[in-house]
């Protein structure tokens, strides 16, 4: 039953996105149906339906909106900063690699965090190391002025709120 509800909900959401982007034209109907079914199957394979927890939906939706707005702001601000650095007569970059703690548990939330960090201008996860107690991400940054440690922590905070996941408990 969970899979059927999950598939129907995703079909409705993806249909809404398709209609919003392509409209209700009969010319694109076949493409729309094929695309919606394909993306639904892919999303079910990559992120299977979990236990329904409607009580958490409002906080997840709010957390996702906060993450999206923050990410957009950071992308715009960082894009201008990187462009400014690249276009100045004396290129203003001092590349560094900074180690940051990964505090999110393994799973989709952590993967989204890695992906979004790589999409932010001026930073990139170049390697992730796991020891017995900790996971460390090595962040390559164009300049320490971009404050990659702060940026990483704020990103983890927002992903944690969007996914409603617990932090890693290093004590036990």
Image: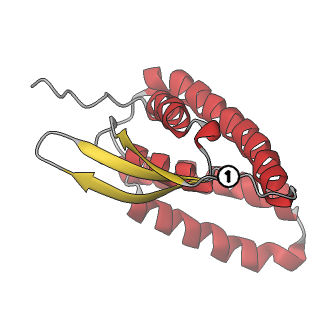
- The residue shown at (26%, 54%) is 129
Q: Residue furthest front?
A: 90
Place of residue 101 in the rendered image (x, y in percent of width and height, measured from the top left): 33, 38
- The residue shown at (47%, 31%) is 153
Disc tally is 1
Place of residue 78 in the rendered image (x, y in percent of width and height, measured from the top left): 73, 45
Out of 72 and 136, give the one closest to the viewer: 136
Colour convention: secondary structure
Please, is residue 39 above or below residue 2 in the view? below
Out of 95 and 77, give the one closest to the viewer: 95
Within 10 Å of the Cα at label 1, are there few (<14), some (14-19), or many (20+) other Cα atoms?
many
Out of 103 and 166, give the one closest to the viewer: 103
Place of residue 45 in the rendered image (x, y in percent of width and height, measured from the top left): 39, 64
Place of residue 145 in the rendered image (x, y in percent of width and height, measured from the top left): 64, 38
Secondary element at tag 1: loop
Q: Is residue 1 visible?
A: no
On the rendered structure, is 151 left or right of 104?
right
Q: Is residue 51 visible?
A: yes
Out of 26 and 20, give the one closest to the viewer: 20
Q: Image quadrant for the C terminus?
A: top left
- The residue shown at (87%, 63%) is 24
According to the picture, the residue beneath numbered tag 1 turns out to be 121
């Amino acid at each position: 039953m969970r899979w059927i509800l999950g598939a129907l909900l995703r079909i409705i959401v993806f249909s809404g996105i398709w209609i919003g982007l392509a409209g209700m034209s009969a010319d694109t109907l076949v493409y729309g149906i094929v695309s919606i079914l394909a993306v639904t199957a892919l999303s079910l394979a990559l992120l299977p339906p979990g236990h329904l927890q409607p009580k958490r939906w409002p906080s997840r939706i709010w957390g996702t909106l906060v993450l999206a707005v923050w990410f957009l702001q950071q992308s715009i601000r960082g894009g201008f900063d990187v462009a400014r650095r690249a276009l100045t007569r004396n290129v203003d970059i001092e590349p560094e690699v900074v180690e940051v703690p990964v505090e999110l548990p393994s799973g989709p939330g952590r993967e989204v965090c890695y992906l979004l960090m790589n999409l932010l201008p001026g930073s990139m996860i170049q390697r992730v190391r796991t020891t017995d107690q900790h996971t460390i991400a090595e962040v390559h940054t164009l300049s320490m002025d971009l404050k990659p440690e702060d940026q990483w922590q704020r990103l983890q905070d927002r992903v944690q709120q969007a996914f409603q996941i617990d932090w890693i408990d290093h004590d036990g």
